[in-house]
Amino acid sequence: MSETPSQKPKLTESPNSAGIQNERVLLLVFESLKWDIHVLCQTASVNRRLRALAKRLLWRELCVYRAPNMISALTQGSSSGRLIGGWLPLSKLLFFCGGCESTRHFELSRPLPGHFVNSTRFSKTSGRSFLTKYCRGDVLYVSDPCEHSVGDEQNDVGIYRGVFRAFMKSRTRECLIRRQVEFEAALRCPYCGARVWSMTAARLIPRKTAARRLGSNDDGVEYFVCLNGHLHGTCWLVHLSSDDEDDEDGDDEENGGGGENNGGDDTDGGSGSNQY
Ligand SMILES: [Zn+2]
Ligand SMILES: [Zn+2]
């Protein structure tokens, strides 16, 4: 783990704690297991004490292990390591594709179930494609789309997810508030359960850049942002789309967030292994 000592949460190591209840031992065990998400879920459901320990320590360590650069960017300026929305929702966001149902602006013939993913690549360069020009200074990490077949439909559905840094201070949130966009009535964030705004309803989707990034067509993109800055969205994936690595905007790598976002995109252990 590549954190500075000051960012480390304090570990409890009382004389009475032994074995699995000794936090240092527990951290070493999970490190040796490469922070297996399934084992961690099981551990957190054993009893109240371990659930509290996971909430205070383990979910955060899991996130740091899986996506150190991204976590470092998301927690910048917060020496306490606190995160808006908490670490459990972020862990879920890293490891779980939420599936999707029909929404106002995106109709499906049937709901698509969520599922665990082995690894997903999150990128803030990608995230910038989802921000309008006014909001480009916001830092947003977005995953590659997870491909879901819907049977008889011609195109596959792409499901993606992401998270804002410091959403409370973001221009995106400012726009949503200023435009008095209403929350979606029937939809909640699949990661934290908070209410969500439709970015289509808010007219805050830069359709061309978002569609190009996803390999979709301009009117086949919809995403939602929750009160805690988690993003989840859907798109129609166009087969044989052109290479979207070219940044026609020309500003993809520049001035995103005041120049302190070095280190490039975060990758979290490889790409292309979304499964369902
Ligand atoms: Zn999926
Ligand atoms: Zn959320």
Image (tube, rainbow, N blue to C red):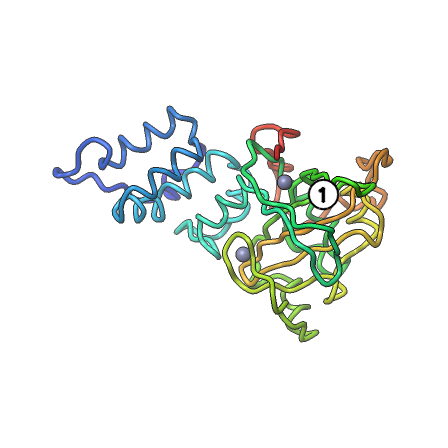
Question: Among all residues in the image, which is located at the extreme left?
Answer: 16
Q: Point out residue 132 in the picture as x, y percentages from the top left corner.
A: 76, 58
Give the percent coordinates (x, y) of residue 227: 55, 63
Task: Tell which quarter ligand 2 is in.
Answer: bottom right
Q: Is residue 96 left or right of residue 26?
A: right
Q: How many marks?
A: 1
Q: Nearer the viewer, residue 144 or 255?
A: 144
Residue at 39% from the left image edge and 33% from the top image edge: 39
Point out the image quarter for the N terminus. Answer: top left
Q: Is mark 1 within 8 Å of ligand 1?
A: no
Q: Quadrant of the C terminus?
A: top right
Position above or below: 258 against 241: below
- Pick whichever, 93 or 69, lies toward us: 93
| Closer to the camera in the image, 128 or 205 | 205
Relative placement, left or right, of 267 versus 102 is left
Q: Residues within 10 Å of mark 1 (few under 14, many from 20)?
A: many
**What kind of element bears circle 1?**
strand
Where is residue 79? Give x, y as percent.
Answer: 41, 50
- Residue located at (68% from left, 47% from top): 127
* Picture residue at 63% right of the left edge, 65% below the top: 173
Residue under label 1, please give it.
158
Query: On screen, 187 above or below 111?
Result: below
Tell me which corner region of the image, top left, top right, bottom left or bottom right, holds residue 238.
top right
Q: Amino acid at mark 1?
A: Gly
Image spot of residue 161 (x, y percent): 62, 47
